[in-house]
Amino acid sequence: MTLDSLVQNVAQSFKARFERDPLWVVAAPGRVNLIGEHTDYNDGFVLPMAIERYTVIAAAPARDGTITWMDRGLQEEFQVQAGSPILKGAPKWSNYVRGVLAGFQQTDMSFPGFDAVMGSSVPMGGGLSSSAALEVASATLVETITGRTLDPVDKALLCQKAEHEYAGVPCGIMDQFISVLGRKDHLLLIDCRSRKPELVPLRDASLGVLIFNTNVKHELSGGEYAERRAHCEEAARALGIPALRDASEALLEEAKPKLNPTVYRRARHVIGENLRTTQAATAIRAGDWMKVGELMYASHDSLRDDYEVSCTELDEVVELARELGTGGGVLGCRMTGGGFGGCAVALVRTSAVETITRKLVRGYKQSVGIDPAVFVSRPAAGATVIKG
Ligand code: GLA
């Protein structure tokens, strides 16, 4: 679904529910990470792009201080008061919004009551940052309502805090950052320590980014994510450095005898992945697609073996992609996002997209028994105000 038709649908749902036209309409994209996984909370490097899948919110002022917020897909809604502290509550998805609204209550950007309807083309729980898209769209709506904007990095941080405190996921900054700052036709090489993005153009029309949703859902608040994060912090402490970003392979090897073997492997992934990510950015700038592909496969192997966040379904997609190989138009493939299901990302020759999709879908269905969802996206722009 295009952004235009999603906007139309959400505006129509707003009119049907609230019997007037929306005054404000905003959108924020989901993301796919080309490489640099589980590095953001280690002060490391990531290389994501915003995708052409969005959360759209249409809204208009309410008569009093009540905020009524409806999800058009689930046909569920919740209400809070703009003038009272906004707490966690039901339904579950509302916590992403509640957390963002509460974050603004802690700034001097106070907002009145309003009615809102949201709709999304980012698959929920599919590893494409549906939650960051919702948080960033919510923050963009509050900015539009108040007529004031936050510094983009502060906006991403406010959204990240909502995820930590209201959704219970101790995520890094990547997802919110790219949903705010994504650039059309560009990947962003983000240094998660300085929080400075570098633009990496991806304009070559003969190349496409293919996203393969395994349709196996993961639950990041399941504890695995927090455990990985804790292992990384333990490794950094043992190495005597602020974060794994500061470690080298040599330093890790030196410390190996005093590290728990699992913690050692987690650290080995992060150190290698940071290197691979900066190397991939260099290779993309040089148009060395073979190198980019090799780095993507190496990233997947490391996430599977050392970081242990892949799953059989993701491994199957990557194996099928490897079998197709460069001859079949696939340059590289890997799991993307937090892991435990969700999506794989592949860099492919545009001319072969249809054949690749057909073969991957057939092979996956045959061995896993699940229908996947596959689409191609150009790098998209970050959050935008469509009306307001
Ligand atoms: C999730 C988190 C991100 C990042 C990735 C793994 O998407 O929200 O902050 O840690 O996992 O790279």
Image (tube, grey):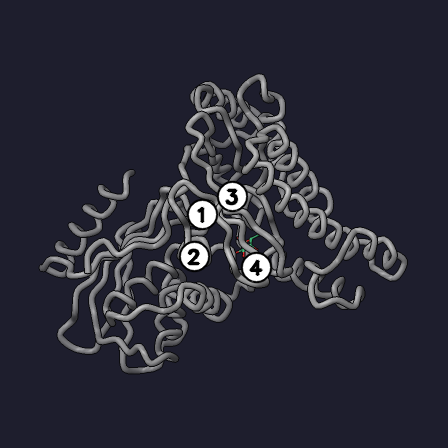
Picture coordinates of residue 234 (x, y %)? 74, 65
Q: Which residue is mark 3?
A: 342
Foreground residue among 358 and 331 = 331
The quarter holding residue 20 reads bottom left
Q: Amino acid at mark 1?
A: Arg
The tag earlier along the polypeptide, 1 or 4, is 1
Q: Residue at x 58, y 17 (%)?
A: 327
Residue on which disc 4 sits: 192
The single residue placed furthest to the right in the displayed view is 257
Name the residue that disc number 2 marks.
132
Mark nearest the camera among 1 and 4 is 4
Badge 3 crowding class, 10 Å Cα cut-off, few under 14, some 14 to 19, many 20 or more, is many
Residue positioned most to the front = 286
Residue at the spot of label 1:
31
Viewer-nearest of labels 2 and 3?
A: 2
> Can residue 126 be seen?
no
Report the front residue among 199 and 1.
Answer: 199
Q: Position of residue 358 (x, y in %)?
A: 46, 21
Q: Nearer the viewer, residue 241 or 346?
A: 241
Mark 1 to mark 4: distance in Å? Answer: 16 Å
Q: In which quadrant of the rendered image does the C terminus lie?
A: bottom left
Instruction: Calculate the distance from the C-alpha at mark 2 to the C-alpha at mark 4.
Output: 16 Å
Work out whether mark 1 precedes mark 2 in sequence or the reverse, and give the earlier one.
1
SS state under label 2: helix
Q: Earlier in the sequence, mark 2 or mark 4?
A: 2
Is the C-beta of the residue carrying label 2 under 8 Å from the nearest atom of ligand 1?
A: yes
